[in-house]
Amino acid sequence: MPAPVTDPPELHGAARVRQLWTLWRAEQTDPEPFYTVLAREAVADLDRRVGPLAGQRIADLGCGPGFYTRAFAAAGADVVPVDNSEDELRLAGEAPAGYVLADAGDLPFEDASFDGVFCSNLLEHTPNTPAVLREISRVLKPRGWGYISWTNWYSPWGGHDMSPYHYLGPERGPKAYVRRHGQPRKNPYGDGLWAVHVGPTIALVQADPALIVERVEPRYWPRLRFIVSVPGLREVATWNCVIRVRKRA
């Protein structure tokens, strides 16, 4: 019989950074271990900050095959997985149970219908970031929480498969990549990938009168959160930005 599949161990400090780096390097061919670790960390963190999550109704926007959905459900949440792609939902086999096929910028839910909205690595894959942010604000209940994370464009992985050509800019970079390598394996620019920057996105969220920005931080090294307060540096060194919000009462 094949050996049972086990989750990667829970590590801390430098060992955690090494683990994430190792798993991330294999993410394209074997995504589950990397996202299992991220999901475990995110759900444990949210359970401490905005929990208990048990009994909360949570929308998992851009859920893909449901790595985060599974972790939220294990924590006792009533989680609604949402994605606009059947292919992404079935990337790891069966689609997450109870999934909703919908655009995150036009959600089929009533106002103030969720205790929390989890939006991980979605903004760079939508052409309309403001619409997604408006929908997060709309569907949150008063005092509800939002977790908004994305890979910012000028981070080392901002161009995804096209990295590091993206440092030539969102117009020249993709063209240079295609000339040399052909179309990327996934998420060509303008059809699955768009440039989303840290400063303008923070400003968009802050401009929503219904939302309170509680914290902005680099996802993989949150203790270095001072990075996000330094224009220029934050666009490169953040790598993956997290904005934590609350809906005003």
Image (cartoon, rainbow, N blue to C red):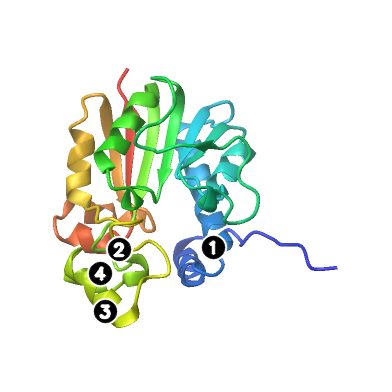
Across and down, in percent, residue 122 comes to: 38, 48
Tag nearer the camera, 3 or 2:
3
Q: Using the image, determine if residue 98 lies above or below residue 192.
A: above
Q: Residues within 10 Å of mark 1 (few under 14, many from 20)?
A: some
Q: Residue at x 61, y 46 (%)?
A: 95
Is residue 129 depicted above or below 106 in this figure?
Answer: below
Give the residue pinned by disc 3: 179
What residue is at 36 percent from the left and 32 percent from the top? 106
Q: Please give the residue where the numbered disc 4 appears in the rendered image.
A: 174
221 sits to left or right of 233: right
Q: CA distance from mark 3 to mark 1?
A: 28 Å
Task: Tell me the tag on residue 31.
Answer: 1
Q: Earlier in the sequence, mark 4 or mark 1?
A: 1
CA distance for labels 1 and 2: 18 Å
Q: Position of residue 73 (x, y in %)?
A: 61, 38
Number of callouts: 4
Q: Which residue, given by chain and number where applicable, does mark 2 sit on?
A: 158
